[in-house]
Amino acid sequence: MKAFWGKAVVFLVALTMVLTACGGNGTNTAGNSNDGNKGGGSNGPVEITFMNSKGQIQAAVEEAAKTFMAKYPDIKVNVMTVASGQSPFERASILYSSGTPATLSMLDAGDIVKFEDKALDLSGEKWVGDLLQKNGSKVAFPFAVEGYGLVYNKQVLDKAVGGSFDPKSVRTTSDLEALFQKIEASGTAPLIIGAMPWSLGNHFLPISYVSQSSDVPTFLSNLSSGSAGLADNAAFNGLLDTFDMMKKYNVKKDDPMAVTADDIAAAVAKGEAAFTFNGNWMISQLDAAQPGGEYGFLPVPVSNNADDPLNAKIPVGATKQIFIDKVGSTEAQQEAAKKFLNWIVYEAEGQDFLVNKASILPAFKNITLEPSDSLAKSIQTYMNAGQTLDFGANYVPGDHSKSVGASMQKYLAGAADRAGLIADLEAYWKSKK
């Protein structure tokens, strides 16, 4: 899952656009069309809308919709996306409030439960039997298996170490700093850190959540009740020790809050920085900045213990999930939406879209296409070795990215110390009791 993990709620009127007029990246490209033709038949095709919340693959989704419509001319698919600075949860909520919900809504996995009363039961669909892992939800279609960690440019690292870089050579925070020093000595900036709240709040910090000895829900419940804290938590402090070291080598440390997702992709792709923190969803941005690059993932260490198994793992999970609306959509629209999802899973062009065009690791065992991009291949290596952590963002509330992300931004910028960050985080979780 290409990203990351504030977001001002902007009240938008949903605008309908024919897919061929869609364009842009990370902006609204179409509105909900459920108030248009619903039944199809003699009145024309059944019209459905798909809310895509992965801005990095917007162009691929639009092209996939065109391909699907060419084969199924009785269905018209309008694609909309989530505005920059807005969460998928917020966008979907606004559409429901305005009475124009999307037929298909792609949300972060942790937000699916909030729409279960509005979502169609999909437990009887064929693809449920082809899932690689049990989904745990009757309404969610797992769209993307994604992972994240320290993304590196292999060519830069090979030069720095004087040979082929081996990710297994880094097993502690100290190992990582020693590598940064080698990179610096080779004439390249070791690292650039993105200031995006979703990356800092929903991806980086939750590494500490999924690194606990207890299961994730129990740990977060204990944080909420106040029976667990962060000041003496080993994994939390180990992660922040690594982050403090990363800040020291951040090429943009003098103005860290100005760094965007496009900035970090360009810097790593062009070899101006060896590392950044992000996920496999950024591959399209890397390729756009510098085609033909080779990249990989390095886990973020949470301790200086070389035998700590957590230091060899990256978070991986089904991060983006889709539900079909049952409140504002007709039965014809619901069936058309099901057909679109089945096209992705079972038809060659749909599978090609998912794996090759969108660079998504599929959640279905029947899809045998191998990922072509280096970041997806790197994730698969960790998966095959059993070296994965839970995807922490799947466990957190919808406002975690905005609230906790803002706290992490203050810490990144030096506007808060560790004690201040801990106070912010513990207050946030206690508010969720």
Image (spheres, grey):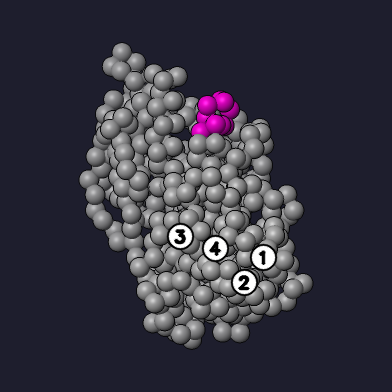
Residue lying at 48% horizontally and 55% vertically, measured from the top left: 270
Contact, CB < 8 Å: mark 4 with mark 2? no
Contact, CB < 8 Å: mark 2 with mark 1? yes
Residue lying at 60% horizontally and 40% vertically, measured from the top left: 372
The residue that label 1 is drawn on is 161
User: Alpha-carbon neighbours of circle 3 within 10 Å: few (<14), some, or many (≥20)?
Assistant: many
Range drawn in magenta: 345-353
Residue 147 placed where, x, y %?
A: 58, 54
Task: Please name whichever residue, 178 or 168, is drawn nearer the observer in this view of the structure.
Answer: 178
Task: Please name whichever residue, 373 or 426, is drawn nearer the observer in this view of the structure.
Answer: 373
Element type at mark 2? helix
Residue 79 placed where, x, y %?
A: 36, 36
The residue that label 3 is drawn on is 267
- For marks 4 and 1, the one nearer the N-term is 1
Residue 298 image label: none
The residue that label 2 is drawn on is 182
Residue 341 placed where, x, y %?
A: 50, 32
Q: Which label sits in the foreground, 4 or 2?
A: 2
- For marks 3 and 4, the one nearer the N-term is 3
The residue that label 4 is drawn on is 274
Q: Residue furthest top?
A: 42
Q: Which label sits in the foreground, 3 or 1?
A: 1
Task: Please name whichever residue, 1 or 105, is drawn nearer the observer in this view of the structure.
Answer: 1
In the displayed structure image, the side of residue 61 where residue 279 appears, left or right: right
Residue 175 placed where, x, y %?
A: 67, 73
Disc 2 residue type (three-letter): Lys
Residue lying at 54% horizontally and 63% vertically, measured from the top left: 274
Does 348 appear in magenta?
yes
Disc 1 residue type (three-letter): Val
Element type at mark 4? strand
